[in-house]
Image (cartoon, rainbow, N blue to C red):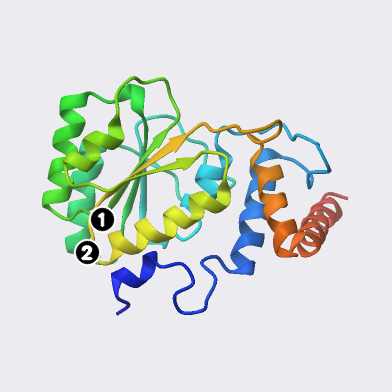
Amino acid sequence: MQNPADAVVAGKHGEPLISDERLLQLHAALLRATNSKPAKAKAEAAPAIKFPAVYASLLADLTPHDRITADIPLHLAPFTATAPLELNPEIATGFAIGLAQNQPGSLVIAFTRAGRLDADTFRQTLRTAARHNAPILYVLLPAPSNFDWSARAIREDVPCIPVDTHDAVALYRVAQETTFRARNHGGPSLIDCKQVQLSRGDSNPVTRMEAHLRRKGLIAPALQHASTKSTSATSRLA
């Protein structure tokens, strides 16, 4: 089994953290979610779903034995055929503890919004998850809140990773680390998705991803893949 410490060292073994194939898959998932064509220079696609980069990245490496839970409505059709179970974080935690016993190596991804959480209840939930090494990732989607959930999680011995809601690459790196940890008895993590916009168009996940692909020299394969998929879909409808 791989040493968990190795998972957090970028390029330690000479391999990229994210393969070219996975980058292209993330790009394709974003296009499906936003109902957009490949972004042009300075173009901004109007997202058809809120926070598509979060779902595209965090659900990319799920297995059939993993489970998704949420206490808010989620439309996940562009990303997975697995419908989320309507469970709040407390019940999802108990579900994850049972899953660890019955299907070792599986995990639960629990989506919620910070504004929906009761401080005392969620504090106890985090403490229970840490005590039982529950294989669960709590994902806080952006919402107005004055409570510092990151500090609370750390006090309850649950690692918390703030990450840009619109950056699919950063989100996927976080997913790699936290899912590896959960699958290998490392316990729960809290992924705190933040709204970050440094410049015009910065909140468009497709534009952000295509800028990354361009830097990697992968934009041509990505656009060709998108064009092929679009042509194929059109042919089936003709």
Which residue position is annotated with label 1?
Answer: 135
Residue 154, image x, y percentages? 22, 42
Q: Is residue 79 visible?
A: no
Q: Residues within 10 Å of mark 1 (few under 14, many from 20)?
A: many
Horizontal arrangement in the rendering, residue 32 relative to residue 19 (left or right): right
Residue 192, image x, y percentages? 39, 38
In the figure, 200 relative to 236: above or below? above
Dots 2 and 1: beta carbons under 8 Å?
yes
Horizontal arrangement in the rendering, residue 168 relative to residue 193 (left or right): right
Q: Residues within 10 Å of mark 2 (few under 14, many from 20)?
A: some
Q: Tell me the quarter of the picture where residue 98 sits.
A: bottom left
Q: Residue 199: which disc?
A: none
Residue at left 58%, top 69%? 19
Tag 1: residue type? Pro
Q: Is residue 107 visible?
A: yes
Residue at left 59%, top 46%? 78
Quadrant for the N terminus in the image: bottom left
Residue at left 61%, top 55%? 26
Q: CA distance from mark 2 to mark 1?
A: 7 Å
Q: Secondary structure at mark 1?
A: loop
Residue 37, image x, y percentages? 79, 44
